[in-house]
Image (cartoon, rainbow, N blue to C red):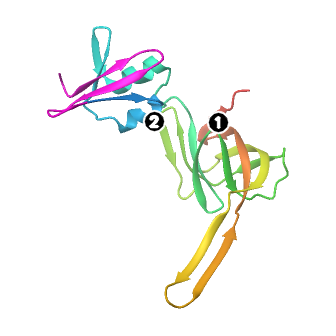
Amino acid sequence: MDGGRATVDASFISITSIHPCYLITQPIVNPLHSAIALNKNLLAVVGNRRTPYTDTLYSATGFHSDKGKVMYAVISTGGKQYKVRAGDTLKVERLTAEEGSTVEFDKILLVEDDGQVTVGAPFVEGGHVSALVTSHGRHAKVKVVKFKRRKKYRRTQGHRQFYTEVAIKSIHGTGGSMAAAEG
C-alpha cells in the first residue's frame, strides 16, 4: 500500500490513509475543498486504474480543474483586491450606483485567459469588468472593546460596514478577449 488510497463512489468519497501506527478513514463532504488538504502522495483507485488523486476526484465528482479553461481577473475596488470570474457574486465596499444599474471596474491588476496571463503595470490597459449591482446592505455587527485592567476603563462600540453586492457579467481582457456570464 503506497501511502494511502481514495475510494471513489458517486455519492460518497472516503480517504483511507495508511500510517505505520494506525489507520484513518474519514468521509469527504466537499471533495473540491478537501482535495487541497489531502496528502500529495495519496493515490485514488477507480476500477483497476491507479491515478493521482486530483485527477480522479475531479473527474469522478464532476469538478474540473480551472487551469486554462475559465477566464478570470483580479480587480481593485474600495482598497481591496478580488479575484473574479464571469457569473460570480461578491460584496464590495459601498458604491454610489443604484440597484439594477451596471458598473464598470477599470482597475484590473491581472487577467488570465486560456493560460495566458496579463499582468498590469499597475493596471491592464484596455481591460475592464462589467458588473450588475444587485443590492446594498450592511455586514454583521463587529464589536469594538477597549479595556484596561485595574483602571476602571471599559469602552464598547459597535460597527456595521456598508457593502454593495455585485454580480459579475463579463470580463474584457486585452486584445478583445471576453468572458460573459451564462444566463
Q: Is residue 106 left or right of residue 47?
A: right
- Answer yes or no: is residue 67 visible: no
Q: Is residue 5 magenta?
A: yes
Q: Secondary structure at mark 2?
A: helix
Q: Residue at x 53, y 91 (%)?
A: 151
Neighbourhood count class around disc 1 (C-alpha, 10 Å): few under 14, some 14–19, many 20 upward: many
Check if mark 2's residue and mark 1's residue have beta carbons within 8 Å. no
Q: Is residue 68 left or right of residue 178?
A: left
- Identify the amino acid type marked 1: Ala
- Identify the amino acid type marked 2: His
Q: Residue at x 58, y 87 (%)?
A: 153
Nearest to viewer (mark 2 / mark 1): 2
Q: Is residue 80 left or right of residue 3?
A: right
Q: Residue at x 61, y 41 (%)?
A: 173
Q: Residue at x 64, y 55 (%)?
A: 107
Q: Residue 156 is drawn in which quadrant? A: bottom right
- Answer yes or no: is residue 151 visible: yes
Neighbourhood count class around disc 2 (C-alpha, 10 Å): few under 14, some 14–19, many 20 upward: few
| Residue on which the image places disc 1 | 86
Q: Which residues are magenta?
A: 1-23
Where does the image place residue 128, in percent across and percent down from the top left?
67, 46
Q: Is residue 69 left or right of residue 93?
A: left
Which mark is drawn over residue 33?
Answer: 2
Instruction: Give the quadrant of the N terminus.
Output: top left
